[in-house]
């Protein structure tokens, strides 16, 4: 059984207003806990790739699950291709 951590349930780590050092710290905590699955949910998938690269210079670890909030067809058409392209 893999324990899951819903990180930042009341925030969006990929918001531009988030201090970049917080993302770096979260990335270090994720790397330090490979037996936990960290679920990162965002409405700002357009920011995710660049910010994930900063969080994980060696590549996004396997214990990260990325979720995207989509609330309309317009957002789906804009954001789903972005979400699929994030690795």
Image (spheres, grey):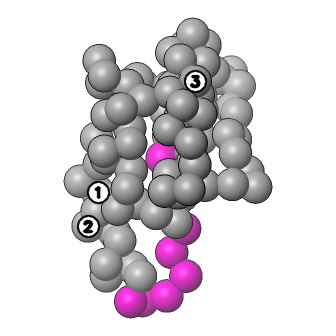
Circle 2 residue: 81
Q: Which residue is mark 3?
A: 25
Please tell me whether residue 72 belongs to the stretch shown in magenta: yes
Quarter of image, res 42:
bottom right
- Which portion, as a residue range, is magenta? 66-74
Disc 2 secondary structure class: helix
* 2 or 3: tag closer to the N-terminus: 3
Q: Position of residue 49 (x, y in %)?
A: 31, 47
Label 1's element?
helix
> What percent of the width, then of the height, locates residue 67?
51, 54
Alpha carbons under labels 1 and 2: distance apart: 5 Å
- Real-space Cα distance between discs 2 and 3? 28 Å
Residue 29 falls in image quadrant? top right
Tell me if residue 4 comes above or below residue 76 in the rendering.
above
Which of the marked residues, 1 or 3, is nearer the chain's N terminus?
3
Whether residue 6 is in magenta: the answer is: no
The answer to whether the residues at label 1 and label 2 have Cβ atoms under 8 Å apart is yes
Q: Provide the residue designation for mark 1.
A: 84
């Amino acid at each position: 059984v893999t324990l899951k951590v819903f990180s930042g349930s009341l925030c969006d780590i990929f918001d531009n207003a988030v201090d970049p050092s917080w993302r770096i710290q979260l990335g270090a905590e994720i790397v330090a806990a490979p037996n936990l699955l960290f679920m990162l949910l965002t409405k700002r998938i357009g920011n995710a790739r660049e910010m994930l690269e900063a969080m994980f210079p060696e590549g996004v670890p396997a214990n990260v699950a990325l979720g995207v909030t989509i609330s309309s067809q317009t957002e789906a058409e804009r954001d789903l291709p972005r979400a699929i392209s994030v690795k």
